[in-house]
């Protein structure tokens, strides 16, 4: 494989943040401690810990956490000897106060996440993170939904605010490999900072897309152990480590230890198998935010309608992260149209 960057690949393990959606934000302190400790020992570079919707996400709208995320961050930091604990922040859900608190507890990196067309709301948080001495990266969500030149324009904004990398975030798991290539190549051409890629496996393309991104020069890569991430999960990290090794890309992470963590520590946390089932498949197909899955399934049950209809309609309306309340509206409307009641 010809990599178009000389920089080392840095992996961020997101199961303790993106996986929070899968467990309805019910991670315990013990689970976070065990996973973080084992990943750190295996050589993982970054371990992201936050509510699934980022700092401040524990609300009725997004789902309340069982344990305050600051406690979870503190716990992860206390067991990491070499890995950096990362947090995610969506401006408006999380605030500068939560960012300061996370930094005081030892978080060393923040990914400031915005919808792909709304990078301007990230300025304050990126500036603050840099002032606090954190690594500050931009995370452009729903990257499939904007034309490439728009993505480049928005990434440049984040770079101008001080972001040290910008991610192409395939929140819906909707991108096809050639679309990933186009996006990473365009960003590489226009930006001087590192480019990252975050996949969801809803169309079974997470690994293929990740390799396409790496080939085009992405150096910051996300994965989740056992695909413990929203929808059908992310690029499966322990598999990624094996594939990179086969490609001759040394990331300094112990493969056997990763396999053991995946099976013995993360496996028992999974509420079910992270296969591509009808809900996640429809999200990739219709371009819907992966974290909407549980909400749509619950709304489907409540209104007696097929969650796929809700997801397709949300895709049609181009719903963005943060609009979880729209899921109930859509379900109520569809139920009325189909002559069903809550
Ligand atoms: C709600 C935040 C979201 O889960 C961030 C993310 O991982 C994505 O957009 O894929
Ligand atoms: Mn995600």
Image (cartoon, rainbow, N blue to C red):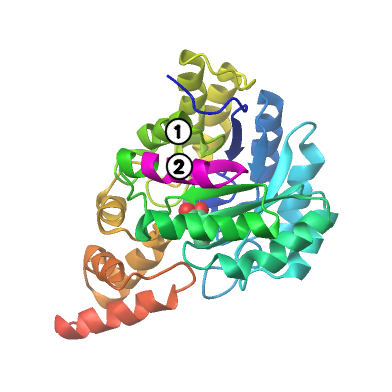
Count of marks overlaid on the render:
2
Query: Which stretch did the figure color magenta?
Result: 181-201
Q: Secondary structure at mark 2?
A: helix
Look at the picture and state if 4 lies above or below 46: above
Which residue has dot 2 on it?
184
Depth check, front residue: 296 or 246: 246
Which label's residue is closer to the chain start, 1 or 2? 2
Q: Residue at x 31, y 70 (%)?
A: 314
Callout 1–callout 2 Cβ contact below 8 Å: yes
Look at the picture and state if 87 lies above or below 339: above
Residue 326: where, in percent of width, then height? 38, 78
Q: Quadrant of residue 311?
A: bottom left
As drawn, the label of residue 100 is: none
Q: Secondary structure at mark 1?
A: helix
Look at the picture and state if 233 lies above or below 312: above
Magenta stretch holds residue 148: no
Residue 8: where, in percent of width, then height? 62, 26
- Residue 200 visible here: no
Which residue has dot 1 on it?
216
């Amino acid at each position: 494989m010809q990599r178009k960057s000389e920089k080392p690949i840095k992996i961020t393990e997101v199961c303790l943040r993106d996986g929070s959606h899968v467990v309805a934000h019910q991670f315990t302190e013990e689970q976070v401690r065990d996973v973080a400790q084992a990943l750190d020992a295996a050589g993982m570079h970054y371990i992201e810990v936050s509510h699934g919707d980022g700092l401040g996400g524990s609300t009725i709208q997004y789902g309340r956490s069982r344990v305050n995320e600051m406690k979870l961050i503190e716990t992860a930091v206390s067991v990491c000897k070499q890995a950096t604990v990362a947090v995610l922040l969506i401006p408006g859900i999380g605030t500068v106060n939560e960012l300061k608190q996370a930094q005081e507890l030892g978080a060393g990196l923040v990914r400031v996440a915005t919808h792909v067309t709304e990078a301007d709301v990230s300025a304050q948080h990126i500036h603050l993170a840099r002032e606090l001495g954190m690594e500050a990266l931009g995370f452009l969500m729903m990257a499939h939904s904007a034309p490439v030149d728009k993505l480049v324009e928005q990434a440049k904004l984040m770079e101008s605010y001080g972001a040290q990398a910008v991610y192409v975030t395939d929140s819906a798991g909707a991108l096809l490999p050639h679309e990933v290539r186009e996006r990473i190549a365009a960003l590489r051409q226009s930006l001087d900072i590192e480019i990252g890629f975050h996949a969801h496996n809803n169309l079974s393309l997470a690994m293929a897309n990740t390799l396409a991104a790496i080939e085009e020069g992405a150096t910051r890569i996300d994965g989740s152990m056992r695909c413990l991430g929203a929808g059908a999960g992310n690029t499966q990290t322990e598999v990624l480590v094996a594939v990179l090794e086969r490609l001759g890309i040394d990331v300094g992470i112990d493969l056997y230890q990763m396999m053991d963590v995946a099976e013995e520590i993360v496996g028992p946390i999974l509420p079910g198998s992270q296969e591509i089932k009808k809900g996640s498949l429809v999200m990739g197909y219709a371009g819907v935010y992966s974290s909407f899955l549980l909400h749509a399934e619950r709304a489907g049950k409540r209104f007696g309608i097929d969650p796929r209809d809700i997801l397709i309609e949300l895709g049609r309306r181009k719903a963005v992260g943060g609009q979880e309340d729209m899921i109930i509206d859509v379900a109520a409307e569809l139920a009325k149209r189909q002559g069903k009641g809550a």
